[in-house]
Amino acid sequence: MPELPEVETTRRGIEPYVKGSLVTAVVVRQARLRWPVPVELLQQNLVGQVVDSVRRRAKYLLLDVADGCLIVHLGMSGSLRLVAQGVAVGKHDHVDLCLDTGQVLRLTDPRRFGAVLWHPSRVEQHPLLAHLGPEPLTDAFDGELLFRLSRKRRQSIKQFVMDNRTVVGVGNIYAAEALFKAGIDPRRQAGSVSRIRYLRLATIIKDVLARAIEQGGTTLKDFVGGDGKPGYFQQQLQVYGRAGEGCYRCGRALRQLKLGQRATVYCPGCQS
DNA sequence: CCCAAGACCTGGCGGC
DNA sequence: TGCCGCCAGGTCTTGG
């Protein structure tokens, strides 16, 4: 479900309700997520603490308290919602953070690829975060970086831009969309793409992600942001999920193939 | 170091 | 209806 725009939408949705409130309890019904949820650590370190800030790094949501940080990843199918205390618990509602406001921050994740972890100090140094590339919407990410990192790389450009060491937050949907808008064939070897094309691609990646965030993310299945509102970006998708249908630009049938085990849709006429 | 494939899970869908 | 194979927004881990 969540790519960066969906995670950022979630962050913005929950921040007003979570920031500044005190954690009264942590309830873990299913500790077997991507990694075991450290129940004891969470209860010892979070309960009685005030959440100072709700941040995002890549697709990780970070809830800071005085002595450390709660790390949440939504995986493929996770979502975070605020519900009133006492709301019935569903089959895939694995973790609750109960707040002194009477609300509960609830993690739902059917596929359990998500994660809930604790880090006792500078969270940027957590092994999962330490080697991430730059945030796509900052000046640290640009076409020069893409060009430089891509030299001598033989993997496809799509896999290259989806690699979190290159830049974070470009998932399967937005990689396909950005490459379509940039007119680049997703199968192209990263190292064979020109500097000029990378400059344009970086601008497009920023634009696509920023616009998706503005629209509240892409709603696939039942994604909703923390405020319960659906996203509307799916109405803007040019290629993702449209294999076999006509290209909006040239009319040719969009094709689908696999790159790095991921479905990849592109236009044989507009992308080369 | 680079790269591809495997692994982790559940649920929904199309086909027979 | 029921079962089977395939597919799905991520990314760590393994093996060549």
Image: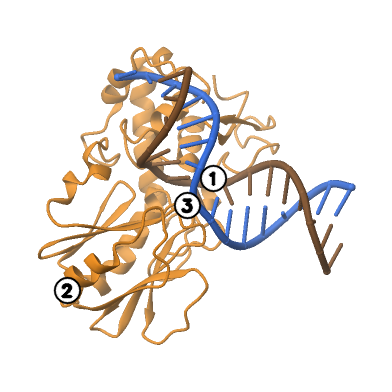
Chain colours: A orange, B blue, C brown
Instruction: Please name the residue shown 47% across and 83% down the image.
Output: A88
- First-in-chain label (3 vs 2): 2
Secondary structure at badge 2 equals loop
| Depth order, front residue of A45/A53 | A45
Q: Chain of mark 3?
A: A
Residue A47 in sight from this viewpoint? yes
Residue A214 in sight from this viewpoint? no
The residue that disc 1 covers is A237
Q: Chain of mark 2?
A: A
Amino acid carrying label 1: it is Leu
Give residue A178's position: percent from left, percent from top. 45, 35
Quarter that holds the C terminus of chain A: top right
Give residue A149's position: percent from left, percent from top. 30, 21
Q: Residues within 10 Å of mark 1 (few under 14, many from 20)?
A: some
Instruction: Please name the residue shown 61% across and 29% down the image.
Output: A267
Q: In the shown orientation, is residue A155 left or right of residue A100? A: right
Q: Do dots 3 and 2 share one subunit?
A: yes
Give residue A54's position: percent from left, percent from top. 23, 62
Mark-to-mark CA distance, 1 and 3? 19 Å
The residue that disc 2 covers is A20
For this orientation, the residue located farthest to the left is A66
Q: Quadrant of residue A198?
A: top left
Q: Residues within 10 Å of mark 3 (few under 14, many from 20)?
A: some
Mark-to-mark CA distance, 2 and 1? 37 Å
Instruction: Please name the residue shown 17% across and 44% down the image.
Output: A125
Secondary structure at badge 3 equals loop
The residue that disc 3 covers is A76
Q: In the shown orientation, is residue A6 left or right of residue A11? A: right
